[in-house]
Image (cartoon, grey):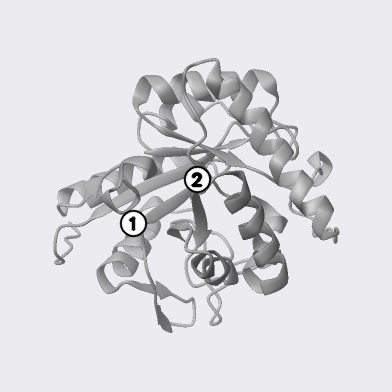
């Protein structure tokens, strides 16, 4: 059994959900929402629709899971994973529109969107491009200073958000490998994904224990870790989520929704 020898700390498990599309089934969403602490909900641009948003919000509320918007490029054909160059005005409009769509539905359940996490290519591009990262950060900060911005740790997105003194939650990916520059290995490469739940558990354990990213080369990059992301569109998502949650609890970490973590209250 894996054990973690660090001081007690809070941590969060987040998952991309409501992503029903021709690319992905959302059949595991109800079970994942019994495990994770925060849901990043597709807003209809890369996947999902009004029905899936209602469903995820309703189940999230019943399970004490915090609600987040998961805005993307308007590209359902490619599940939001194709890089698209847009103007700053278009990027701003894209994020605000998707936030408002989800927020309007959340209010029907007396809930609210408490965090935002960009999806797919939009997220990957902003990790590398400080100009795009600045645009997204300023847009989210302009919506509400109370919003938590969930970003890949060590990315340009983290840099941009901290310059604005935003509420920033830094995430690591349980089911993805990292390049030596701290960015995710491209999904076009064979070693991009970690599909074995036990391997994913070891991957997360090492990163949380060392507060460092594990690069596939063996390199480690010191980083902040507030949250662990598990993608909901992998066949092994449910087993991976169960395994990682059990490991974190066994090692004394306190699992909390993002909006209830002490650093954001």
Circle nearer the viewer, 2 or 1:
2
Q: Residue at x 25, y 68 (%)?
A: 209
- Taking the spot 66% from the left edge, 63% from the top edge, the residue there is 124
Query: Given the current orientation, which residue lies at the most extreme top position?
Result: 108
Q: Nearer the viewer, residue 44 or 177?
A: 44
Image position of 154 (left or right of 123):
left
Residue located at (62% from left, 50% from top): 142
x then y, percent, for residue 252: 14, 52
| Residue 201 numbered tag | 1
Residue 191: give x, y in percent of width and height: 58, 67
The disc placed on residue 147 is 2
Q: Quadrant of residue 100?
A: top right
Dot 1: element: helix
Percent coordinates x, y for residue 89 in the rendering:
82, 54
The quadrant in which the N terminus is found is bottom left
Work out whether residue 151 or residue 242 is closer to the camera in this orientation and state it.
Answer: 151
**CA distance separating discs 2 and 1:** 29 Å
Picture quadrant of residue 94? top right
Q: Can residue 79 be spotted in the picture?
A: no
| Above/below status of 221 relative to 73 | below
Near mark 1 (Cα within 10 A), the count class, few <14, some 14-19 or many ≥20, is many
* Numbered tag placed on residue 168 in the rendering: none
Q: Nearer the viewer, residue 164 or 19?
A: 164
Tell how many labels. 2
Q: Is 29 on the left or on the right of 21, as rendered?
A: left
Q: Image height check: is 204 above or below 129?
A: above
Residue at 26 percent of width and 49 percent of height? 262
**Percent position of residue 35, x then y:** 35, 35
């Amino acid at each position: 059994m894996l054990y973690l020898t660090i001081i007690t700390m809070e941590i969060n498990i987040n998952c991309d959900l409501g992503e029903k599309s021709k690319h992905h089934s959302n059949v595991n969403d109800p079970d994942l929402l019994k495990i994770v602490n925060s849901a990043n909900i597709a807003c209809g641009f890369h996947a999902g629709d009004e029905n899936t948003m209602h469903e995820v919000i309703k189940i999230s509320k019943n399970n004490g899971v915090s609600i987040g918007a998961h805005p993307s490029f308007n590209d359902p054909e490619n599940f939001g994973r194709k890089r698209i160059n847009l103007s700053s005005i278009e990027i701003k409009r894209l994020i605000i529109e998707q936030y408002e769509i989800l927020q309007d539905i959340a209010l029907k359940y007396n809930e609210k969107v408490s965090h935002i996490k960009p999806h797919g290519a939009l997220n990957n591009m902003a990790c590398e491009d400080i100009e795009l990262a600045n645009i997204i950060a300023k847009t989210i900060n302009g919506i509400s200073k109370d919003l938590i911005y969930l970003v890949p740790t060590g990315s340009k997105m983290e840099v941009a958000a901290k310059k604005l003194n935003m509420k920033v939650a830094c995430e690591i990916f349980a089911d993805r490998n990292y390049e030596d520059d701290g960015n995710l290995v491209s999904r076009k490469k064979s070693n991009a994904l970690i599909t074995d739940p036990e391997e994913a558990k070891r991957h997360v354990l090492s990163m949380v224990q060392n507060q460092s990213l594990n690069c596939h080369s063996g390199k480690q990059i010191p980083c902040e870790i507030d949250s662990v992301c598990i993608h909901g569109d992998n066949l092994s998502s449910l087993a991976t989520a169960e395994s990682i949650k059990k490991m974190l609890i066994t090692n004394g970490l306190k699992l909390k929704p993002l909006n209830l973590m002490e650093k954001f209250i």
